[in-house]
Amino acid sequence: MTAPDRLRAVLKEPGLVTMPAVWDGLSAKMTAAAGFKTAFLSGSCVAASRLGGPDLDLISFAEMFDSFNMVRGAAPELLILADGDHGYGNAMNVQRTVRAYGRAGAAAILIEDKITPRALTAAGKPCMPREEARMKIRAAVQAAKESGILILARTDCRPTQGIDEAVARIEMYVEEGADILFLDSPADDAEIRRAVAAAKGRPSFAVLSPGAPRATPSKTEAEALGFKIGTYPTGMLAPAAAGIKAGLDALLAGGNQADSAMPGAELRAILGYGDYDAQAKAFIIPG
């Protein structure tokens, strides 16, 4: 069964699908080992890990695709929803992006309607005209037929153009054949319900990490509101950053590691030293 088909089966199961946000081999490997079937290759997490910077459209297609290959290599059974951002250009760029991820084994890919290049400010999310957004999703859906990869269509227009326009776009994406729908930055539960209704039974996706200026329901609340997928971009990234800071603080204080550090034996087990030795035995020359 292909990765897209496996994800379709997961989405038919009851309950909210929790998608941890991953960015490299270690985060993916630990996610799979914890028992998760799916994960979101998050652009914000990749930007943080590769650039040490914010998610402001500075990451390229090549960098995101390289991160996907790291994730895929470390956890080949994990079903990955790849962050395709704005497709890295026009509708033809979108098709190239979708085809590349589909051939590489991604289960799904996100395509959004933000304008690129963005204005030189971190504030706001200006979006392209509705019909241009339609053509991007149309191009994505057509390109997806090659591999069967699922298309997650995201609209970011709520903060700049209002909820009515955002809901209209979700309805439009459904008409164009998008598999999963995503309203970014809903203001409240009423807006969430409108967006879920506009998806007409297709799965709705939500970012459920706290802290951003948007409605952020709990997992139980999200499921009750009709969401099918919830991702947590800061769920592992923030603790990882805190762990790095704790380690540096310990070194600055003259210690050799933070009190919260993972024991060496556990870390070696996670990294697979024992697995390496077991697999390498087949190639050791006798004597």
Image (tube, helix red, strand yellow):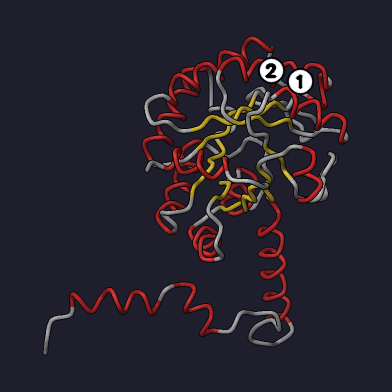
Percent x, y for residue 181? 65, 29
Percent x, y for residue 121? 77, 32
Q: Quadrant of the C terminus?
A: bottom left
Three-letter code, disc 2: Glu
Percent x, y for residue 251? 68, 81
> Tag 2: Cα neighbours inside 10 Å, few (<14), some, or many (≥20)?
some
Marks 1,2: beta carbons within 8 A: yes
Front-most of residues 17 and 61: 17
Front-most of residues 18 and 130: 18
The quarter of the picture where residue 227 lies is: top right
Residue at position x 50%, y 42% from top?
Answer: 9
Left or right relative to 230: residue 5: left
Q: Quadrant of the N terminus?
A: top left
The quarter of the picture where residue 283 lies is: bottom left
Three-letter code, disc 1: Val
* Label placed on residue 222: none
Residue at position x 76%, y 21% from top?
Answer: 166
> Tag 1: Cα neighbours inside 10 Å, few (<14), some, or many (≥20)?
many
* Label placed on residue 171: 2
Q: Height in image: 81 above or below 129?
A: below
Left or right relative to 121: residue 46: left
The total of numbered circles placed on residues is: 2
Label 1 sits on a secondary structure element that is helix
Front-most of residues 89 and 209: 209
Q: Rounded to the nearest whole Å, what is the CA distance between mark 1 and mark 2?
A: 6 Å
Percent x, y for residue 103? 36, 36
Q: Which residue is mark 1?
A: 167
Q: Height in image: 51 above or below 283?
A: above
Residue at position x 66%, y 64% from top?
Answer: 240
